[in-house]
Image: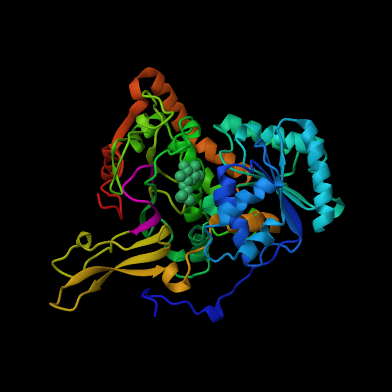
Amino acid sequence: MPSSEFTADLTETLCVESTPSPCGLVIFGASGDLTSRKLMPSLFRLFQRNLLPDNFFVLGFARSPLGTHGFRERIRKDLSEQSAATPQTVENFCEQTYYLPGSYDDPALYQELKKWLRDLDTRHDTQGNVVFYLSTPPRVYGAVAENLAEAGLLQQGGQKTSWRRLVAEKPFGHDLDSARQLNASIAKCLAEEQIYRIDHYLGKETVQNILMLRFANAIFEPLWNRHYIDHVQITAAETIGVGLRAGYYDTSGALRDMFQNHMLQLLALVGMEPPSSFEANHVRDEKRKLLQCIRPFCPQDVEQHVVRGQYLAGEVEDQQVRAYRDEDKIGQDSETETFVAARFMLDNWRWRGVPFYLRSGKRLNERRTDISIAFKPVPHSIFNPLLPEHLAVNILTLNVQPLEGIALRLQAKRPGPKLCMSTLDMAFSYHDVFGDHPPDAYERLLLDVMLGDQTLFIRRDNSETQWSILMPILDYWQKAGSARENAGLTFYPAGSWGPQAAQELIQKDNRMWLNSND
Ligand code: BG6
């Protein structure tokens, strides 16, 4: 019997899952970490579940001088940790993979790629359909798209008889101007319907569930507004540090790395109006409208309602860890933030006056991403002498990871004396109800690209709006940085919940961060 208070009647579960049409997948940057850690394992799991088309191939493309043989060796190694995989299944999967070495900016190589694609298309009967996946440093995105276009590789068949799609990993730009330029250069080569900008948070089951919870249940919508909700908190806490990504991270920082994409997308999903259907452009239209309602940050807002922090040495998960500035390839004077907490206000009828507090950081006390909707207190207490403020408020928490689920905090009577009140959590855990942990976000996203469903991908206007929300903060920090030491950077010991200033940010509104033992 599951320990969760909820059970799912699986016989009544509505499952809509399709297998994509035949296609090939070309991965640029195929010798990199993302391919090994995420793309190949996800493709393999789709293969095991018969969700890849029967007619399918993967062509890896990267600088590393591997051949198909070497590429397959790597895949076998990457998949060796898949417990349920028999050697024969791995072999069957590997037989559909190939590798072409080359430099992304060499036009001659795209002619070579064209020949490969022609051959592989014939061999696997993939009907001319190709996904190009950019898992390269973003600075080469524009050049790859142009080279593909020049080689005629982005041309779709007439009346969409065959299709070509491009997937781009984040970061998509470094600021608003560079994002616009990148979008403009890619738009010269492909239509928006062919472009799939990844925000892997959107592929997480629990993130997709936000829309199901809000719009497939009638009980939430009447309460989902400023009349009943006091505030919203979104936390994405990580225990890991900068790891091997110092080169990228030190020029990015938490605001660009987590807020520009994942955090603002979570905010949009919680705050958006119901779309008229679960169709890609309807959903993305509503997200854009919501993002456009975020009150622009003026310099005083940045000073008062945004906190940037950087981790010092400390203890995380019983291990002593270094300060950010002592990490490999990070300078002693780095002013890059590894933590941000901010208060966002939304100016529309639904949310006016309801603060959204967002925080995200590395080397925090625990790994946890969740969204908490804190409801208003009861208007009057009938439980004399208890006042309304003595009664803990209801909180709906959507646990995105690692323990995926939903919890509703309620007040209830405890057996005992007449006024014995206590707080209890009604909790649903994905794992308890549905068995396994949810699939990796990349499985969903890769499948959706092949199916041509853009709902979980970032449209150009969404991405640019997200940048424009953050630009006043980035500009302010940059100016402050040239005017004074540390640009308002505050520090926190690794293993804590961030700088003291993050506590003060919310405490000055008479609230506190939820679900953290600080
Ligand atoms: C990535 C960021 O987009 O998301 C990383 O670049 C971060 O810095 C990661 O660690 C977090 O993703 P997840 O799925 O582990 O929460």
**Dividing the image into 4 quarters, which one contains the N terminus?**
bottom left
- Residue, x 20% and y 75% (percent of image)? 414
Which image quadrant is residue 344 in? Answer: top left
Q: Is residue 152 visible?
A: yes
503 with respect to 2 (left or right): left
Viewer-closest of 310 and 67: 67
Number of numbered callouts drawn? 0
Report the coloring of the rendering.
rainbow
Residue 359: x and y, percent? 38, 44
427 with respect to 391 (left or right): right
- Residue, x 77% and y 38% (percent of image)? 148
- Residue, x 44% and y 77% (percent of image)? 7
447 with respect to 4 (left or right): right
Residue 60: x and y, percent? 69, 45
Say if 465 sits above or below 88 in the image.
above
What secondary structure is the magenta-colored segment mainly?
strand
Query: For residue 362: magenta?
Result: yes
Viewer-closest of 396 and 451: 451
Say if 114 sits above or below 84 in the image.
above
Viewer-closest of 441 and 454: 441
Viewer-closest of 504 and 485: 485
Q: Residue furthest top?
A: 483
Q: Which residues are magenta?
A: 358-375
Residue 358: x and y, percent? 39, 46
Say if 384 sits above or below 100 in the image.
below
Say if 450 sits above or below 86 in the image.
above
Query: For residue 187: magenta?
Result: no
